[in-house]
Image (tube, helix red, strand yellow):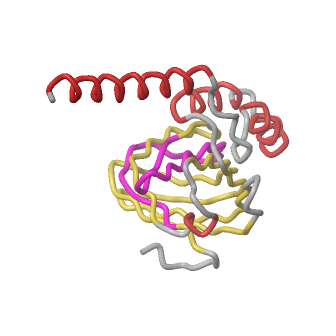
Amino acid sequence: MRVSLRLAVLAFCLVGFAANHAAAQNPPPPRRDTFKPEEIVREGHRFFGTVSRGLAQVVQEAFSRWGEPNGYVLGQEGSGAIVVGLRYGDGKLYTKNAGDRRVFWEGPSVGFDYGGEGARTMMLIYNLPATDAIYQRFAGIDGSAYFIGGFGFTALASGRVIVVPIRSGVGLRLGANIGYLKFTPRATWNPF
């Protein structure tokens, strides 16, 4: 009885090892619903224009941290803060397999943050299960240092979905804050 139990366990382990070895030999096919770094940089250069000198480095950093996004947003936004801040924006969400759609975002923030800015924004979207999943709140910490112009990125999350705004702004803004962005299908003044 013990011998047959040991043989069954050994056979089970060998079958599992063989399956893992076969899976390692045949990696999964590349996903067709994500964007490659070259595609994002090309669209970013087209969108940001002459201020996109650092775009390739920012995109490369985002790709090294989070991989290939399965969506991105191109838009513009405005924000201002004196300790408490507000941000409003609109743009278009692009995906490879679920179509494109117009999105709006707004959100409050609080922190050591002063000034105002206007920005062209590209947001890389990771792990978006469906286009409607963008319509929720994404929280995070943001830091800004603009004097006339600037370029930077941050990350916001809600569950497994990650939004990485890359902003090229004009204005005067300095500080750090905690807040969220709420995405909606229609423009609204209510950031909550």
Instruction: Say which residue appears at 73% left-offset and 62% top-offset.
Output: 98
Quarter of the image where the N terminus is located: top left
Instruction: Say which residue appears at 66% left-offset and 68% top-offset.
Output: 103
In the rendered picture of this protein, how many numbered marks are placed on residues? 0
Q: Main secondary structure of the magenta part?
A: strand
Residue 58's x, y, as percent?
Answer: 62, 30
| For residue 1, side relative to residue 142 (left or right) | left
**Which of these two is toward me, 191 or 32?**
32
Instruction: Say which residue appears at 69% left-offset and 43% top-offset.
Output: 34
Residue 51's x, y, as percent?
Answer: 75, 35
Residue 10's x, y, as percent?
Answer: 30, 22
| For residue 130, side relative to residue 144 (left or right) | right
**Which of these two is toward me, 65 or 13?**
13
Quarter of the image where the C terminus is located: bottom left
Q: Magenta segment range?
A: 154-182
Quadrant for residue 37, please give it: top right
Residue 137's x, y, as percent?
Answer: 45, 64
The vertical placement of 71 against 30, above or below, is below
